Amino acid sequence: MEKEPQKIDPGIFKVPLYVSDSLKKKKGGYERTILNAQRSLRAFAEKYGWGALTDEPFLKSARIFDDQGIFIRNLLEVTGAPEATELPGTVSACLENDILMSVSPELYAIIYPEGIEERSFEKLIIHEMAHRLHIRILEGDENKMGPVWFFEGFALFAAGQFEKALPLLNPVEIRKIMSDDRRGSYRKYAEMFRFFTRNFGLKDLIEKAYDPDFTIWLEKKL
């Protein structure tokens, strides 16, 4: 029988963790990182009045791999996606069916060097859990998460990723990103999301994100 998450504190759970053989000496450190990631997300959620939404665990087990190919095969198996599914070359973590899957911190630094900053591996885990928090805020309706730049922006914001990046976007670039359904630069998504939260407020943004006129509403501040 698979072990259940062990509650440590409100909203904080120790979960069963599998790691590749080469990573076993670092398993204790990974377990601490997963706990710290939950604490960070809990603090974020409480700040906005969503603390109760973290009472139940976002993950019931975790797996960390030393090989991206094995990680991707695991991801496809857990999600039930076809083996031929094409994923971005930078894909490094995923949380589906209550299972957190990730590459190791060292491999993450190679796959996605742009994302390396202080506590970057912890933030990667927070990011994946933040998507689940977002869905809970929307009472389970993933269709209300908004465009890709927005729901990724929310996860980046919750995780505190790219906070020290210099602002580079102007209104023309922001409009271009908003009109593009394809995945783009996460750094730019983070910058856009911070810009709009300063002008509208986070809860208003989440409420409006699935409105057909969301982009028009946002453009009032550009």
Image (cartoon, rainbow, N blue to C red):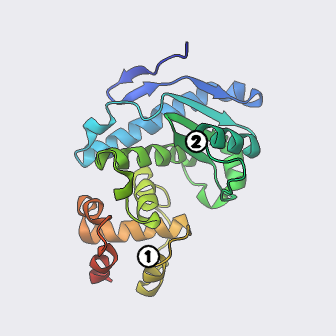
**Residue at (43% x, 49% y) in the render:** 131
| Residue identified by numbered label 2 | 79
Residue closest to the eye, 155 or 212:
212
* x and y, in percent, of residue 4 in the image: 47, 18
Badge 2 amino acid = Thr
First-in-chain label (2 vs 1): 2
* x and y, in percent, of residue 25 in the image: 71, 25
Q: Quadrant of residue 94?
A: top right
Where 163 falls versus 53 (above or below)? Answer: below
Where 203 falls versus 4 (above or below)? Answer: below
Outermost residue, top direction?
Answer: 1
Q: Judge left or right: residue 197 versus residue 61.
A: left
Determine whether the residue tagged by mark 1 lies in a helix, strand or loop: helix
Quarter holding the N terminus is: top right
Q: Quadrant of residue 121?
A: top right
**Residue at (64% x, 53% y) in the render:** 91
**Residue at (33% x, 36% y) in the render:** 54
* x and y, in percent, of residue 80 in the image: 60, 41
Q: How many marks?
A: 2
Within 10 angstroms of label 2, few (less than 14), some, or many (20 or more) residues? few
Quarter holding the C terminus is: bottom left
* x and y, in percent, of residue 215 in the image: 34, 76
Q: Judge left or right: residue 198 versus residue 172.
A: left
The residue mark sitting in front, 2 or 1, is 2
Badge 1 amino acid = Met
Which mark, residue 178? 1
